[in-house]
Amino acid sequence: MTAYFDALETRESAVREKDLFEKLPSFLARAMTQAEGLKRWLGDIDPQSIDSRSALASLPVLGKQDLMSAQAENPPFGGFAAADALRGNRVFMSPGPVWEPQGFGADPWQAARALFAAGFRAGDIVHNAFSYHMTPGAFILDEGARAMGCLIFPAGVGNTDSQVEAAARLRPTAYTGTPDFLKIMLDRAVESGLDLSSITHAMVSGGALFPSLRDEYYLRGIKTLQCYATADIGVIAYESAAENGSPYPGMILNENLILEIVRPGSGEPVSDGEVGEVVVTCLNEAYPLIRFATGDLSAVVEGPSPCGRTNTRIAGWMGRADQRTKIKGMFVDPKQVDAVMKRHPEIARARLVVSRADNQDSMTLHVEAGGGAELDAASISATLSDVTRLKGDVIGVEAGSLPNDGKVIADERDYEN
């Protein structure tokens, strides 16, 4: 059995990086011609100059709210989709609402590579229990499995008894869906005296795969891995496993994607290992999203996977980056904390802690100095007040002491008392 989906997975990292940034300028030039909304968003830039990570980091981050605003002004895609993607194709609606066009060709969301790593092979019969209603969730895995040569049963969500009965008769070898629904199906099968032992491997997403649940599936003969996917990008990263099905640490970044982990509220990349917001640039001709902020937190895991795949690993989903918080009746955004840091370059890291004392909200900016610089708490406090229109204290803390959890704003108020 072939160990890898293709040779791209085991390239030297430097070769992959060179290939991506050689392709990016011409891709960006085409995208700005075909997608007027993207061109307006990026402004007057020379696409040929965007040939490195530092050059890419100079471009604005596209948040989901930015995309939604553009789509509201210029429905349905805000000018971010290529015209050719809108003919003879599908369009999906995710909560927000956000409209997404399906990409070109087979496996437009790049799911096949993740499925292969999870043990899916041509000839497998796949019970797909993701939703086929409005959102692209089911289609992401459906298109990837079909591109591999699998036979798909589009089960969708709900109707547990009917799904179990169908699976007992069809005898699928694989499952795609949320982590918990597979257990619901297996338990219902036991109650009904039906046999679902044909399912031997699963790819799950859209929810937490807790270790205890993965272990339970393993004891029931099902090797279960998970992928990290979004409706806008598709499969961003995926797990791999040893021969016995034991997952290796972290998730492997998919090919044809440029990943950045940035400080929430800013477009500035953080150091490897530091938690920040996942920002992705995808070389998708139909839907070219450049520096798209997913709103999810993660961190780069050091070194390549033991499975031999050489792309960057991330820690998986670590929470949401949107930390906008109301203090004394006014919203404070991570972008405002970033604005304070930009006015005071002596600050290396900052964290706004929101608490409550004497029945009143209070905020304190904890700051770490960079490179032995001196911190002027009074000056920083004045800037904080100017930016947020709220008074707050500033405390200098020891370098490296702020938690590595991606939080720029930490709301520590007790909402139960």
Image: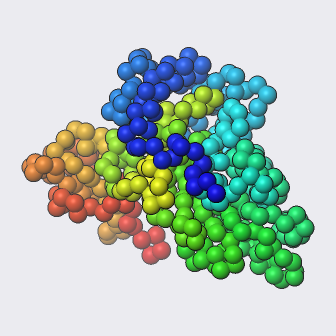
Up the image or down, 184 lies above or below 338; here it is below
Q: Residue at x 44, y 54 (%)?
A: 313
Q: Position of residue 203 (x, y in %)?
A: 65, 60
Q: Position of residue 294 (x, y in %)?
A: 51, 46
Tell me, yes or no, if residue 93 can be seen here.
no
Q: Residue at x 40, y 33 (%)?
A: 18
Q: Residue at x 46, y 70 (%)?
A: 415
* In this rendering, position of residue 105 left or right of residue 272: right
Q: Position of residue 54 (x, y in %)?
A: 32, 33
Tell me, yes or no, if residue 411 can be seen here.
yes
**Total tally of numbered discs in the picture:** 0
Q: Quadrant of residue 170?
A: bottom right
Near-viewer residue (65 or 113): 113
Residue closest to the far front: 1
* In this rendering, position of residue 10 left or right of residue 379: right
Q: Quadrant of residue 59?
A: top left
* In this rendering, position of residue 217 left or right of residue 18: right
Q: Residue at x 52, y 38 (%)?
A: 256
